[in-house]
């Protein structure tokens, strides 16, 4: 009797293992057999998404921010013509390095590999179809404004949070030494 019971358990275990294997294979098989996208498919997606133009735009914005930082650093300072020329050269060299490092020619192969490892051919085709559609193109047209407004919303939420964090730190550790010194100087008047 015991042998029959043990044989039934063993048979049940085998059936359970087979069923588990079938479930696992049914979940994994679609991923294993998903066709890898071709470089041409990914390049077409990049084209309809205007990736190269967006990169150029971002690099231009970075240059503007860099120019603003330099202006802020030299604000109120009298620069000689030689100093101004050095700053201009430094700015040009820095921008050259950024544009060389983040050129589309260098980034595209890395992005292509990333997309190929993350998405199947079918996904690339569907995403391309969306971005090539009028709705997808309108979305891309509005993306810069959406991003700018999103950053404003995030900043609106994070500034008060950072202030609360600073207050928590002051409560926990006390006022910074320079704040106390400033308070003493202010009270000495």
Image (cartoon, rainbow, N blue to C red):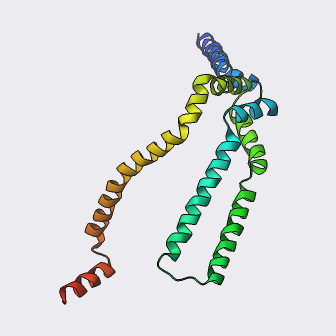
User: In the figure, 141 relative to 181: above or below?
Assistant: above
For the image shown, how many numbered marks are present on the structure?
0
Q: Residue furthest bottom?
A: 188
Toward which corner of the image does residue 41 lie, by quadrant? top right
Which residue appears at 53% of the width and 67% of the height?
Answer: 69
Drawn side of residue 86 relative to residue 157, left or right: right
Which residue appears at 50% of the width and 81% of the height?
Answer: 77
**Quadrant showing the C terminus:** bottom left
In the rendered image, residue 9, in percent from the top left (x then y), is placed at 60, 15
Drawn side of residue 130 relative to residue 150, left or right: right
**Quadrant showing the N terminus:** top right
In the rendered image, residue 68, in percent from the top left (x then y), is placed at 53, 65
Q: Nearer the viewer, residue 10 or 80?
A: 80
User: In the figure, 147 relative to 59: above or below?
Assistant: above
Toward which corner of the image does residue 96 lie, by quadrant? bottom right
Which residue appears at 69% of the width and 60% of the height?
Answer: 98
In the rendered image, residue 29, in percent from the top left (x then y), is placed at 71, 21
Q: Nearer the viewer, residue 19 or 111?
A: 111
Q: Nearer the viewer, residue 150 or 167?
A: 150
Task: Using the rendered image of the protein, determine whether residue 148 is visible from the camera's viewpoint.
Answer: yes
User: In the figure, 15 relative to 157: above or below?
Assistant: above
Task: Using the rendered image of the protein, determine whether residue 38 is visible from the camera's viewpoint.
Answer: no
In the rendered image, residue 181, in percent from the top left (x then y), is placed at 28, 84
Drawn side of residue 159 relative to residue 137, left or right: left
Q: Nearer the viewer, residue 116 or 186?
A: 186
Which residue appears at 44% of the width and 43% of the height?
Answer: 149
């Amino acid at each position: 009797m015991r042998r029959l019971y043990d044989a039934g358990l063993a048979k049940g275990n085998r059936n359970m293992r087979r069923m588990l294997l079938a479930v696992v294979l049914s979940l994994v098989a679609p991923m294993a057999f998903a066709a890898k996208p071709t470089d041409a498919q990914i390049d077409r997606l990049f084209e309809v998404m205007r990736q190269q133009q967006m990169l150029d735009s971002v690099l231009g914005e970075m240059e503007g921010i860099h120019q603003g930082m330099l202006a802020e650093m030299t604000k109120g300072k009298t620069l000689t013509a030689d100093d101004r020329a050095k700053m201009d050269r430094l700015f040009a060299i820095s921008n050259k390095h950024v544009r060389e490092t983040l050129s589309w020619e260098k980034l595209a192969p890395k992005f292509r590999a990333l997309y190929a490892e993350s998405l199947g051919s079918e996904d690339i085709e569907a995403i391309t179809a969306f971005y090539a559609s009028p709705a997808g193109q309108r979305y891309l047209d509005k993306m810069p404004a959406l991003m700018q407004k999103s950053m404003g919303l995030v900043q609106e939420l994070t500034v008060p949070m950072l202030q609360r964090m600073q207050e928590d730190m002051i409560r926990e550790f006390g006022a910074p030494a320079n704040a106390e010194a400033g308070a003493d100087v202010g009270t000495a008047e």
